Amino acid sequence: MSLVPGSEGRRIYFIVFVVLGIVAALYAQVLQADYVWDDVAFFTAASDLRTGDPWKAAVASVIAGTAYFRPLVMGTFIAEARLLDANPLYSHLVNLLLHLVNTLLVGMLAWRLARAKELKTATLPFFSAIAMLFYGLHPAMVEPVAWAAGRFDLMVTLFCLGALLLSVSNTWWGDGLCALFFFAAALSKEMAVTFGALLFLWLWALQAPALGLAFNLRGMWERKRLYGLVLAAGVAYLTMRAQYMPNMVSFDPVVAEQLGSWARRGAYVGLTLDFYLRTVAFPFLHMGPLHPFDPLLLDGPQTAWGWAVVATSAAWLVISAWRPTTIRLLLSAALIGLLPVLNFVPLAMVGNIGHERFLVLPLAFFVLAATLLLWRITSGIYGMANLPRWRVLTGCLTAIWLGVAALNVHVTVPLWKNELVFWHWAYRTHPDSPYAQFSLAAAAINAKRFDVLEEVMTKAEQMGVMPLRLTVPYGQYLAKKGQIQEGIDKIRLALQNEPQPHLYLQQESIPLEDAVVQRAGFNPWFVVYAYDAMAQMQLSLRQFDQALESERIAHFYERNNPRTMLTKSFALYGLGRVGEAEQTYQDAENLYLPRVVPEARRLRASFLEQLCGHESSQHNPTCRQPLSALKPASP
């Protein structure tokens, strides 16, 4: 933000401090939150970030079965996991700081825009403040801030907005840093693919939109150094990506098959855009982690509406290029910023049509356009009669929107407190969603809240048809009620329709230890969860051989999972293979987060007491020595 001498300088710094303080205060509760959703896979359930080659972990696909290449953000996760023991406090603090910086960058872009439009100097601080409030308090920002994995969107936005701010300098150092920031944005998330168009529209909006497209295309030649450096950065990124990530696109083949014709696919794109536009303008009624949409239920009216949205948006882009204004260009930039998430190729989003976090970058342009529109209404540029009344009305509506937004943020942030609270929120919002049912049931089991588990299972039974994957926590539910074998049967039923490459290896008599599953196009999380749950039930039945085999399969799909390794050690103890059990347990403990180790030791001690307290274990080598000899030393 340009320095302003005298009282105006003090005013802008004071206003920026107040706005950022308001945003920080509303989000302060996030610092008390635990890891939820994919954070659990990143930081606690697996150990990929904490062990092995850090570079290999950084350039690997973010989620198994996808082509998400985001090494810069993964590098921050790896640093947290290895230097700070994956403490959720620091993860959420980093995300909050990123949001505050992005809010500041929006204010700086608004300042630059206002100066380009020759607003009065006294107006500049308030123009920037309104843009920062719209952005910083928008409820759609809760998801990326409160969810550690939302950092992908926060960081790509940080570097894209920073690059746009640097682009106006027209100097060697400014152009070079702009290209470097774009390269960093591309290494943060694939949404940076639209940056070239955003850069062009931003510079066009700053200069003289009325001179038209041809004039500004000629202006690109005058900034050939900038565009050339950005192009070189893009080529460098694609070269690096091709080396580590051969697949360029991830998509949901099930949704693509369900949509079928291009007519339905086009309608799906329009409905996705409609979702994001409604979320930008009025995000207060449907906030949440899940926004389920079943392509099989896409009917005639929805298809017509989807195509109407597509046609209207395309017409808007054409009109903006033909008769450009600053507001039209900024809104066009927002639409283009949304292109990567509009399901042209259906994204793998577990049956959701979209997510709020995808708005982090496009929202900046919506906010700049809205702020400029408000200023023009209140300044009388549109020649409205009875201008004082319009000013009062506009001011009241803006204050009401910001007030409701702030209240929404205050209420929503605590819902990300932990897995149980989070998924209970999702379940209340979408009780028919199989994903919400499964996730809440799994969270209830981990939290030992069997009352919540029973509530989910009872309602699922009342629905008549239980989702197949939900039968795994249902089997765990039956096991808790003493129906252990019935629980194992339920899990086997759930696994029947899951891809299991290890079955092919067994048919070919290839040892699992001699093979590595190729995770491209295959995410094994559910198979691992199911086999580990079955192994724990088999332990309860003292079927130690079967439990060991179940964990051997789980280990094949995810080799560094401390939870499955812990269960495997229990099976080895049960079989009397003490040396192997001790080594396996120690390996598990080394993979666990330090704060989780005491719980692992408690589970081990409890298992050993139950094992050796059974009359059939009197000849088990594990129980021939004092249990104290099996207890690991305190850290």
Image: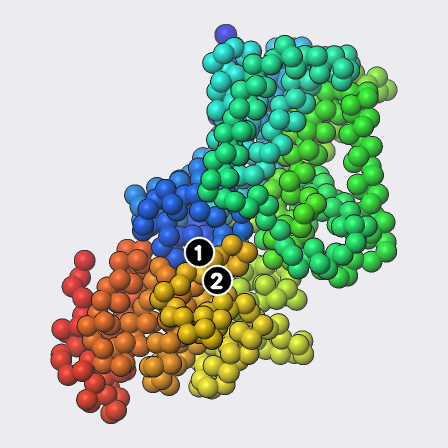
| Residue at the outermost bottom position | 615
Residue at x 47%, y 57% (from the top left corner):
518
Picture coordinates of residue 563 (x, y %)? 36, 65
Which one is closest to the eye, mark 2 or mark 1? 2
Q: Which of the two residues, 276 or 197, is positioned nearer the viewer here?
A: 197
The answer to whether residue 290 is above or below residue 499 is above
Q: Which of the two residues, 238 or 168, is positioned nearer the viewer here?
A: 238
Picture coordinates of residue 478 (x, y %)? 49, 82
Q: Secondary structure at mark 2?
A: helix
Picture coordinates of residue 145 (x, y %)? 51, 42
Q: Quickly name the residue at label 2.
A: 525
Residue type at tag 1: Ala
Question: How many angstroms separate mark 2 from mark 1 (CA)?
Answer: 9 Å
Q: Is residue 270 left or right of residue 165?
A: right
Mark 1 Cα shell of 10 Å, populated few (<14), some (14-19), many (≥20): some
| Residue at the outermost top position | 5
Q: Is residue 563 left or right of residue 307?
A: left
Q: Quickly name the residue at label 1.
A: 41
The answer to whether residue 247 is above or below residue 469 is above
Q: Is residue 586 left or right of residue 353?
A: left
Q: Secondary structure at mark 1?
A: helix
| Contact? badges 2 and 1 (CB < 8 Å) | yes
Which label belongs to residue 433?
none
Residue at x 28%, y 55% (from the top left corner):
594
Residue 10 visible somewhere in the drawing: no
Residue at x 64%, y 62% (from the top left corner):
430
Which numbered disc flags the more N-terminal residue, 2 or 1? 1
Total labels: the figure holds 2
Residue type at tag 2: Trp
Residue at x 51%, y 59% (from the top left corner):
523
